[in-house]
Image: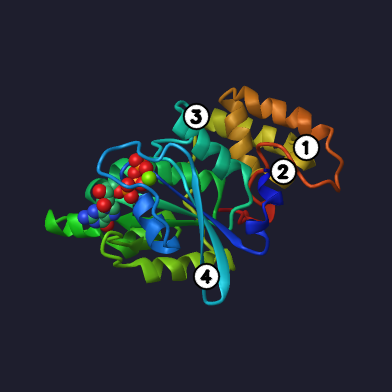
Amino acid sequence: MCYSEDPEYTGAAVIALVGNPNTGKSTIFNALTGLSQHTGNWPGKTVLKAQGTYVFHGKKYVVVDLPGTYSLQSGSAEEQVAQDFLCGKRLQATVVVTDATCLERNLNLVLQVMEVTSRVIVCVNLIDEAQRKKIFIDLDCLSAELGVPVVATAARSGTGLEELKVKIEEISFKRIITNPRRLVYDPDIEEAVALIEQNLPGSVKEHFNPRWFALRLVEGNQSLLKEIEKLKWSAPCEPYRISYSGPDSKNHIPGS
Ligand SMILES: Nc1nc2c(ncn2[C@@H]2O[C@H](COP(=O)(O)OP(=O)(O)OP(=O)(O)O)[C@@H](O)[C@H]2O)c(=O)[nH]1
Ligand SMILES: [Mg+2]
């Protein structure tokens, strides 16, 4: 069934959980939704996306637990699932779940997700393990550097999950506006990206983050070229029904 036709999504805010393998995404998913997605201490347990719901302050949220992925540049099946979902759907918020005991390793994916959408929350999970190892993380500094909210959690014991729900609510209903740090590439790449961005058809800009789309075209992403062809033939008023439909262009914060 097409995402936009699923009755469960009607009127609900759609939230994705993405992150490196074994960072606690499914543990957070289970705590939020009350479901029991399989968790375990080995990488790559979640191979397909799982979906559940919760209600917070009277609003319904659909949460999608994505397989662990190191990047959004699709290589493995897990990366493809994560990339398709994040880049092709109108999500109200994306929570990047990171491992507090090896944070720097996780920041690559954080930066990649922030290229796709500005509606990002960084969840620094396993904070109990970090404390045990005497690792201190300056959450305010991290949030200021990244330009998005940062929440520390110990999902197994439920610590920080209320705050996470509050941040999800704030991002979903635009009570806080993020300003994600943007990666600046070499001048020749930036020039090419700007040129492509200017010349992207309106239909593409409507369904994708134009900068993200242009960057992928510079990389030579063939599947996105095909999406342009498909978009050319879709009637303007028809709901978009292809595998990629892109983050809501209205969600993109100019200059972010
Ligand atoms: N100590 C501690 N353990 C945690 C925490 N969160 C998750 N875990 C444990 O970490 C392991 C991995 O958790 P999962 O939720 O399965 O991780 P995942 O990110 O869904 O893993 P993949 O689906 O492989 O990407 C499990 O043994 C969890 O119980 C936490 O905050 N603290
Ligand atoms: Mg999982």
Which residue is found at the position 32% from the left and 47% from the top? 39
Nearer-N-terminus badge (1/3): 3
Residue at numbered disc 1: 201
Residue at numbered disc 2: 205
Label 3 and label 2: CA atoms lie apart by 22 Å
Is residue 32 at least partly visible in the picture?
A: yes
Label 4 and label 3: CA atoms lie apart by 33 Å
Residue at numbered disc 4: 55
Crowdedness of circle 3 by 10 Å Cα count: few (<14), some, many (20+)? some
Tags 1 and 2 in contact by the CB under 8 Å rule? yes
Residue 74 has which mark? 3
- Residue 47 percent coordinates (x, y): 43, 36
Numbered disc 4: secondary structure: strand
Q: In the rendered image of this protein, does residue 50 appear above or below residue 136?
A: above
Depth check, mark 4 against mark 3: the one in front is 4
Depth check, mark 1 against mark 3: the one in front is 3
In the image, taking residue 123 as reference, residue 248 lies left or right, namely right
Label 1 and label 2: CA atoms lie apart by 7 Å
In the image, taking residue 76 as reference, residue 154 lies left or right, namely left
